[in-house]
Image (tube, grey):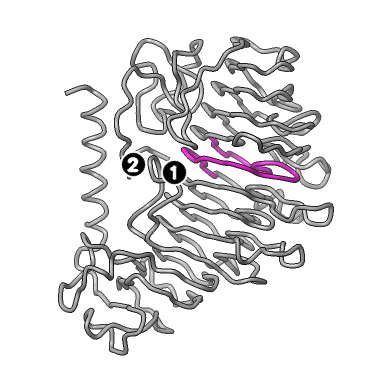
Amino acid sequence: MSTYRVMVFRLLIFAFAFQFAGFAGAEYQYVRQGAAGDGSDWSNALPQLPSVLSRGFTYFIAGGSYPGYAFDDAVSGSATITICKASAEFHGTNSGWAASYGDESAVFTGGLTFISGYYLLNGQTGGGPGAWNKGHGIRVAPPAGEKFGIALKGGAAKYVTIEHVEIDMSSASPTELAGKADAIYSVSDNDSLTLRQCWMHDAGRCLILDRSSDNWLVEYCLFENSGTWASPSNHSEIISAFSDIADQVTDPNKSWVIRYNIFSRWRSTGGIIFTGDGWRIYGNVFEFPAGFESSCGNGVIGTWTQKTTWSDGFNKNHFIYNNTFVNIVGTMSEADIYPGSQVCTNTQIRNNLWYNCPTVKSLGGIDGQHSHNSFFNCPRAFVISEAGMQNETGNPLNQLSPLEYHLNRPTAPGVDLGAMYNDMLGVVRGMDGCLDRGAYEYRDMVLPPPQRLRTITK
């Protein structure tokens, strides 16, 4: 068995054990649309989540439609409340269970608000490689006029994990009047959020808007179509994150990890626009589909131009490695990383790959360090000066699906950044003797992707 197959097998075994060990010994309650019971089993299920949830309990939800909900239960140490979409494989008791309960998504027709912490919202299925935009066990679909899909408020919504959840903002943002809507809205100081294998799409403004939170982990998610109502009075980004001016010194947005995601279609200010300290952005794909154009002045990754208020001295120590940028077409700086005079002190930009991005021309702003990046069919990249630069014509990518871009040949060798930065599918960098640039390591045979990779050290 190949080293890669052994590694994937071990990861899958660990992930399986991890998933089920998290529920061992827990108390269970059951929720099913149209039921009228006490929640003791599927025959006697509750019709919706009760107003008070119990720490240490798991609440299984059958497919169906449910109202929005506010999670405000008092914290008790680190005891977690789990909201879990029931599936054929894992649904607690068999008493009263019907296979149809696991066939459809559990749809929340209003927003979800976290006012307290230590929750796990787990759709069980969908998302990640091979299933980026399908099969999510939980779907949040707020109505017109609602300003968020999932909100974290008050600074107490800490240690929340959201996985296998779709957040569909298309109905919440049908008009310009309702356009200031965000898929995830966090104000402020809601630390240690984990987003895993989620799909967020069609937001009038941002897909994530956060103020002053630390230690977020965002992995294996699809972010698609932000700023559907962007305008001069309604700026938008895929991710917008910064601390208020008074908090910049004492409480910046610290230590985010954004890895192994796909970002598609954004408008207005730019892609990931933020200030903070110690972010790691690696192994992601940023792409515009064929025919889509958007002119963004602040870059695919960058900050704001008002540097004396938001970025000067407060945006530092970031690591932007092994990302792939594809077909990012516009008329401004939409494919740049920290364009122009943006400040990004002690920031490293290495081993990234651009293909067919005609306007990319600037990396690193002021004080950023960059080397060993690759550019293919990027006619303005010649103005970039760095060690180890690869600037060629041709297409180095195979598009195996509408959202996945694998290498069709090795790139010029990148810098060895260590095992933390192995590729999106867990492939060890440089296994074939060439440490490739971009989100995917080149290999002759593409193997089926693992669905849950939890063991990579943050």
299 sits to left or right of 35: right
Regarding mark 2 in the picture, which secondary structure is present there?
loop
Stretch of the chain drawn in magenta? 256-281
Q: Which residue is mark 1?
A: 220
Q: Identify residue type, mark 1.
A: Tyr
- Asked whether the beta carbons under mark 2 and mark 1 sit within 8 Å of each other, the answer is yes
Q: Earlier in the sequence, mark 2 or mark 1?
A: 1
The C terminus - image quarter: top left
Q: Is residue 374 above or below residue 283?
A: above
State yes or no: residue 187 in magenta. Answer: no
Q: Which residue is mark 2?
A: 453
34 sits to left or right of 326: left
Looking at this view, is 313 or 238 the one in front?
A: 238
Residue, x 71% and y 16% (percent of image)? 379
State yes or no: residue 274 in magenta. Answer: yes
94 sits to left or right of 435: left
